[in-house]
Amino acid sequence: MTGPATPDRPAPDRPTADDAAATGRAGGPGVLLCPGMGEGAATWDRLVPPLTAAGCRVRRLDRPDDTRVPTLTAELARLDTAVTGLDRPVLVAHSAAALPAEAYARRHPGRLAGLVLVDPSLVDPAGAARWRWWSAWTAGTVAAGAPVLAGALDRSGLARRYGPGAWRRAVRPMSVRPPDPTAAAAYGCGSVLVGALVQWLAHPAVAAELVALRAVTAAPTLPVRVLTALGDVPTPAGRAAWRAGHAALAASFPAGRQEVLRDARHLLHVDRPETVVEAVVAVRRDSGS
């Protein structure tokens, strides 16, 4: 079971080892914001000002600017580059980004102050194992043909005609805020659409990699907050399963805690940035840093 994919527009900042790419007070407590599947750095626009006002040094990961197949190893390398220059940051990860965030905390707990998982995707070990090879093969096949496919979408006008509308329909139920029309424009580009498709196809394989990592690493003792949004889960059974899955995820960490937000939607960080900021402050306090 995974959370919904949530696209967002691309933003100019890319993760680098140069701390000048971060925003906020130099030397302040670090925060690294990790967007979910299909999202870009701009999904965090409403969260950055209150974090920097609190004295934090903030860096945002962006959407990868290519259509290579994501793997857990590649995502860990991106995180390793992004945390450079941030003094034991709190990783804030939305939706599918929770998988590499957890993996990084398992591999390098001493480099972090803690985790805030914002309505994170859940991993079904049996499903991940069942779909792993199909996932890797299909994602690789689409990635190999990405230039041709993206070019065809652009030349035919299909990307421009249908992509932005599809983006608006996808995000509308996930937020109380109306979709930003300027954010939709990025999805009129064939390469952005194909890149999002590759991420989606590769997700079960990445999940299977995390399952394997969990089997050989201890859960980090870092403070962890799992923020559960139930407001856009349509059925009582679905809400119960989502809540229980997040409770189990929080309980898998020695210092994990769950916060249930019954009326919040999946784009919690867009609708209620103050809730995420409070979780970051609590994790930082519990870490003793």
Image (spheres, rainbow, N blue to C red):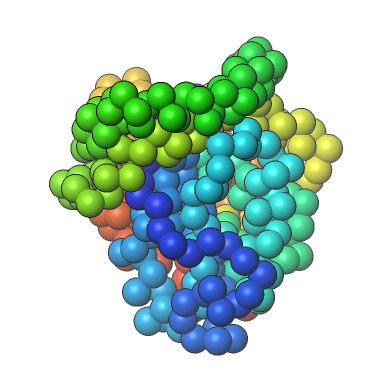
Q: Position of residue 228 (x, y in %)?
A: 40, 43
Q: 53 above or below 242?
A: below
Q: Nearer the viewer, residue 194 or 135?
A: 194
Q: 142 above or below 196?
A: above
Q: Residue at x 76, y 31 (%)?
A: 212
Q: Position of residue 227 (x, y in %)?
A: 43, 49
Please tell me in which quadrant of the rendered image residue 141 appears.
top right
Q: Is 84 positioned to the left or the right of 5 in the image?
A: right
Residue pushed farthest front?
Answer: 155
Say if residue 31 shows up in the picture. yes
Q: Residue at x 70, y 44 (%)?
A: 74
Residue pushed farthest left?
Answer: 178
Q: Is 256 positioned to the left or the right of 149 in the image?
A: right
Say if residue 231 shows up in the picture. no
Give the mark count.
0
Please tell me in which quadrant of the rendered image residue 277 appears.
bottom left
Q: Residue at x 76, y 65 (%)?
A: 110
Q: Position of residue 226 (x, y in %)?
A: 49, 49
Q: Is 218 positioned to the left or the right of 80 in the image?
A: right
Q: Nearer the viewer, residue 286 or 207?
A: 207
Q: Residue at x 76, y 57 (%)?
A: 108
Q: Position of residue 189 (x, y in %)?
A: 36, 38
